[in-house]
Amino acid sequence: MDLTTLTTWIRTRYHQLRTARDAGQSSTEVAVIAGALILGAALLVVAIKSKLAEKIGIIDGS
């Protein structure tokens, strides 16, 4: 997973959430956007964890 792509996607969803909340969207629509934001954050954590594990493997010589 590309960290830059995930971070950009999360930023886009965050701005979409702020705009939707300010525009008076229904709570269901805001919840869907928030759910997508949480999913993106979880994917970012997994991507960072795998990158770190890869770097540690290189350092350890494994």
Image: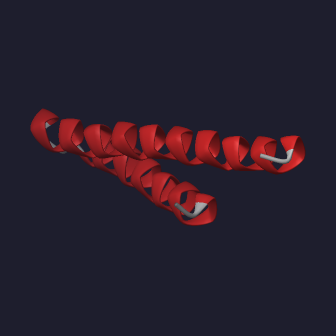
Location of residue 12 in the rendering, given as x and y in whole percent from the top left corner: 46, 59
- Name of the residue lying farthest toward the front: 62
In the rendered structure, the answer to whether residue 1 lies left or right of residue 32 reads right
Q: Residue drawn at (86%, 40%), measured in percent from left and top? A: 60
Q: Nearer the viewer, residue 1 or 41?
A: 1
Location of residue 45 in the rendering, given as x and y in whole percent from the top left corner: 54, 38
Q: Residue drawn at (15%, 44%), measured in percent from left and top? A: 29
Location of residue 28 in the rendering, given as x and y in whole percent from the top left corner: 11, 37
How many numbered circles are shown?
A: 0
In the rendered structure, the answer to whether residue 15 lies left or right of residue 26 reads right
Q: Residue drawn at (40%, 53%), measured in percent from left and top? A: 13
Location of residue 59 in the rendering, given as x and y in whole percent from the top left corner: 88, 45
Q: Quadrant of residue 25?
A: top left
Q: Quadrant of residue 16?
A: bottom left
Q: Nearer the viewer, residue 2 or 40?
A: 2
Q: Nearer the viewer, residue 29 or 55?
A: 55
Colouring mode (rainbow / by chain / secondary structure / one colour): secondary structure
Q: Residue drawn at (44%, 37%), measured in percent from left and top? A: 42
Q: Please say if 35 is above or below 8.
A: above
Q: Please say if 46 is above or below 3.
A: above
